Amino acid sequence: MKTKFIFITGGVVSSIGKGLAAASLGALLEARGLRVTMQKLDPYINVDPGTMSPFQHGEVFVTDDGAETDLDLGHYERYTNARLSKKSNFTTGQVYFSVIEKERRGDYLGGTVQVIPHITDEIKSKVIENAKGADVAIIEVGGTVGDIESLPFLEAIRQFRYDRGHGNTLYIHVTLVPYIHTAGEMKTKPTQHSVMELRKIGIQPDILLCRCDRELPQEMKKKIALFCNVEEKDVIQVVDSEHIYAVPQALSKERLDEQVVDKLNIWTKAPDLTPWQNVVETLRHPGHGEVRIAVAGKYVNLTESYKSLAEALTHGGIANDCRVYLKYVDSEKIERDGIGGHLDDVDGILVPGGFGERGTEGKITAIQFARTAKIPFFGICLGMQMAAIEFSRNVCGIEDACSSEFTECGSPLIHLMEEQKSVNKKGGTMRLGAYPCSVAKGTLAYAAYNATEISERHRHRYEFNNKFRSTLTEKGMILSGVYKDKDLVEIIELPEHPWFLGCQFHPEFKSKPLQPHPLFRAFIGAALLHRNGR
């Protein structure tokens, strides 16, 4: 079967839910037996989001091959079995960079390089390259219709229908139908204007996904269909859901996947959504109640910075048949106020990754509280590094233990990797992507993974300093995971504690609702035991 292409655009407002809609559609098509791949086109000029502040862009998601990408790729991997890569996310910056390199080589034979056809051809070639081997390629265009920087991407996907034909391309537009309280009714004008903008540049949407906070009346669907030039059955409501993992079922109930395979002329089996139904049932009616997990970080005012982390903790709850309530705690407030009142009511403490010195002493204080109060603790990346420093200061007596990322000190427990010392550029130069890790038997990590060899994704420049290994292990710390090729410490544990583990990698990037990550399963299980033992 020829690869079919589905393009998803958005209008009216940003963050309307295109990523979740795309991911949910991917899940539905996989449930019908199709091979799906996914891709995000981002209009911003940065080459990738790797150097952008979390407050600007939210989380940076990392793939196995080391791509720093948009957080929507996290949704794609959580909802589908697609193995995403550097090809799965590209930006305006990457496109222009590639075209300019070709021009400098003389690839265009002295011709004038223009947006059409050179930029649009480059965009199309990247879409086609990523789609190889898939039955269906789902491509989300970032931003909203009407954004000036989106125009080359929209022109490129417009040309796809000309290149591939109606039966091989499909346009889905996600738009907003707001309820105006002062008027006491829902309004269709934002959707009408959004579709008008799309049609001005030559794209007629085949299906409209209408985001709304209540049921869309049939007369509204008729009105939208008439003014937007689509069939009434192609106006599909997407009502706000209490759980994001209920979206695939909701879209299936609205017959979105049926409409898609019909328009693309694909024969498939009926979808089996039983696994998703089980996930939603657990979220709605957990058999083991709720656990409270503190996330002690410095980006807590923008929780999108911890998107994969929050979802992985939810997955850990699904695996333990319990609900996970997240309490975001600003580590700077812990520095200012102390522990009192911030962590008294939690069943587990997680210190996430991050960059820069701000808030790190608060994280160390939170870790000390978790260690001494015997509260389950999970440290990720910087969280693991701060756990090693806390142990060094307060157990090993190394008072000046620190990270050389922040300051020069006598005992740099965390230091710059040797190969990083000659690096000058910031973008794409960290230790990125999947690396193997050897796990010692008889440890918390081994109990979680039930394996001695694992692979996890990284995003960092600084590592545990091997000069201090013996000092910490003599005081009881276990170095339970090691990257053997370079003898790098990957996992640390404290055996005289109910559950205390730190890892240098980011396990949250590989967790899925249908396949919860082993470490999050184990951490939430320990928090549940702590709650029941209080």
Image (cartoon, rainbow, N blue to C red):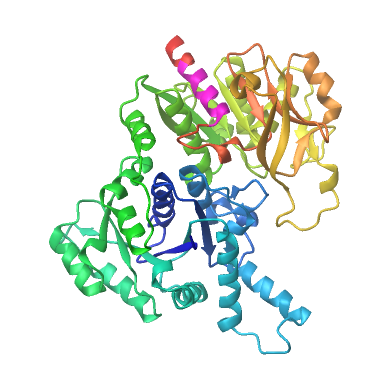
Vertical position of residue 263 compared to residue 371: above or below: below
Looking at the image, can residue 301 be seen?
A: no
Q: Looking at this rendering, what residue extends furthest in the bottom direction?
A: 111
**Residue 527 falls within the magenta-colored stretch:** yes
Q: Image check: 506 left or right of 529?
A: right
- From the image, give the main secondary structure of the stretch colored magenta: helix
Looking at the image, can residue 32 be seen?
A: yes
The residue drawn where x is 56% and y is 56% is 133
What percent of the width, then of the height, locates residue 124?
Answer: 56, 71
What percent of the width, then of the height, locates residue 417?
Answer: 81, 42
The residue drawn where x is 55% and y is 65% is 127
Where, quadrant-wise, is the C terminus in this rendering? Answer: top left
What segment carries the magenta color? 517-528
The residue drawn where x is 82% and y is 31% is 487
Q: Which residue is more in the foreground, 162 or 150? A: 162
What percent of the width, then of the height, locates residue 396?
Answer: 77, 18
**Residue 281 falls within the magenta-colored stretch:** no
